[in-house]
Amino acid sequence: MRKERLIWLGLALVVGVGAWLRLRGLTTTSLWFDEWITVEQSTRPSLWEAITASGTHPPLLRLLARASIALFGTASVPGGMDFAARLPSALLGVASLPFLFLFARRWAGGSAAVGLTAAALYAVSPYGIYYSQEARYYAGMVLFAAWVLHALPRLTEAPRSLGRHAYLAAGLTLGLYNHHLFGLLFLLTFAVTVPHLLGDLRRRWILAAPWVVAGLVFLPWFFFVVGNLEPQARPWLPDLPTQWHDTGIAFFTGRMGAFHLAGSKAGPQFYKPLAQAAWLLLGAGFTVHLVRRWAAPAWRSAIIVGLALGSTAALHAGGQTAKFFHHKYLAFLFPFVCLALAELLVYLATPTLGWSNLRSLVREIRSRSNTIARRTWILAVLWIAALGLTLVTGRHLLPNTVESFARSRPGATRLFQKEQYREAAQWVERHRRKNTLVVVWDPFRERNNLTILRYYGVTAPVVMYKWHQLQHPATFWAKFLAEVAAAQDVIVITAHCSKAQRKQVETTVAWGFPRRVHTQRFIGAEGTIYVTVLDPPDPI
């Protein structure tokens, strides 16, 4: 009893630390471009508009953000919705910690040490903290993945327990409504149940019920998505090796940490070995987990992780999109990352660790290799066949939506730095004069750059330079001739564009304001914001 109390006390401490790290600093940096998409879609006039605002992402987070903003947001104050918009992600991140403990303890054969270590790793993880402080969908992916992975073995132990069926079905449903790529975990968890199901189909057919229920509940949204496909895929990381390296490093450093390392001056000689070391460390953890915990069907870990990585790599290579292997889309694998590292750390901390222990580990690997290989190969072959069929048919049924889009990832001095809209807006307001015109580049129809800058306090007169005006610059002057003619000087703000696009925008405005007075950079791993002050020509 005393030991059990100490375990729950330890978990409470882990949750407390995790909550403090996630809730502090929610307003330190401004909302960045994608976060504003969440805010804009969540705050549309009607609830139905918010739900159906995007087919790219399911509506769960938008509903949570809408409620949070209604309760805690202050739209009239610059930056007054930052905390409210990010609060749901922070709370989902905190809620992940007890689920990670339960999942890791269950998959580690009841080891509370592994469970607490896994939860503690995620509590202080830069990866977990970053996504818990971003108004996007990825903190929820970790939560619902840990939920489902905890529920899975519990159901196979008691296939006729109504409560366990409901517990798993709820996790699957919420996960699907949180992010579409959770569907991969949905399929893989069912796949690892198939051998157990087929072992006695007559008595165990009921095991499929949670997936059937979750699938039926998700079906209306699935049909909505099919009818409202959005061309979103962009190869913003150039190739599979780069994404492989980014993903390995991101599991240890967080998203921004991976971006900064990729763009640092050290370059490949530092970045690639670090990425390879990260994957080797995770591999060592999985090896220890599989060998020591085989009795608690740990083979499921290898199959789910291996097939998830293999599937996303195949989808990446299939040409539909280069984003499948990106680490944020693999967030549902992070519970396994924590589990593998926790198993390794607990194993290394074992007092009896030595050559004899290592030899026994090698003997266990040899004795179990045949069983591992047989079960893994059966499911791997089935999965690869299904995936290949999907890719072959999908390429004919769906249009190729890949756009040529280069994303700059410059190195920066601070980690976890997003786009600095607040700082850019404050700088503009400090340096503009009475008749200064602000010109904002905005590549997308949501007008995010313009809207975020106004939200952080950039006042009128402000005009927008649109995408089509890159090819037809005269249309900018035709539309805003009066505003430009009345301006004493111009401040041009560009974000989410290439160097060539930025130069084109500034060149267009320089027809009337040729003197470059100053260029201020606000560096962020998600895209640097450039603010350039242009003056009219010197009087003759």
Image (cartoon, rainbow, N blue to C red):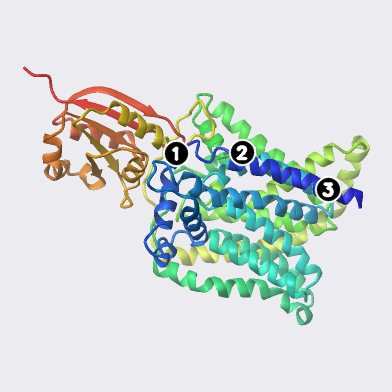
Residue 375 percent coordinates (x, y): 76, 62
Q: Is residue 373 left or right of residue 535?
A: right
Tally of numbered discs: 3
Position above or below: 269 against 88: above
Which amino acid, by three-letter code, is at mark 2?
A: Pro
Which amino acid, by three-letter code, is at mark 3?
A: Ile
Mark 1 / mark 2, whichever is N-terminal? 1
Q: Nearer the viewer, residue 202 or 122?
A: 122
CB within 8 Å, label 3 to label 2: no
Q: Residue at x 41, y 57 (%)?
A: 43
Kindly identify which residue carries mark 3: 7
Residue 92 percent coordinates (x, y): 60, 52
Mark 3 / mark 2, whichever is N-terminal? 3
- Looking at the rendered structure, the secondary structure element under dot 1 is loop
Q: Nearer the viewer, residue 92 or 441?
A: 92
Which amino acid, by three-letter code, is at mark 1?
A: Ser
Figure quadrant of residue 524: top left
Q: Label 1, label 2: how many angstroms apart (C-alpha)? A: 18 Å
The quadrant the C terminus occupies is: top left
Q: Which mark is residue 237?
A: none
- Point out the residue furthest to the bottom here: 202
Position above or below: 235 against 165: above
Kindly identify which residue carries mark 2: 126
User: How many residues crowd mark 1 within 10 Å: few (<14), some (14–19), many (20+)?
Assistant: many
Q: Nearer the viewer, residue 523 or 133?
A: 133
Q: Residue at x 52, y 65 (%)?
A: 390
Q: Label 3, label 1: how many angstroms apart (C-alpha)? A: 38 Å
Q: Label 3, label 2: how many angstroms apart (C-alpha)? A: 24 Å
Q: Is residue 359 left or right of residue 277?
A: right
Q: Which mark is residue 30?
A: 1
- Between disc 3 and disc 2, the foreground one is 3
Q: Residue at x 53, y 37 (%)?
A: 256
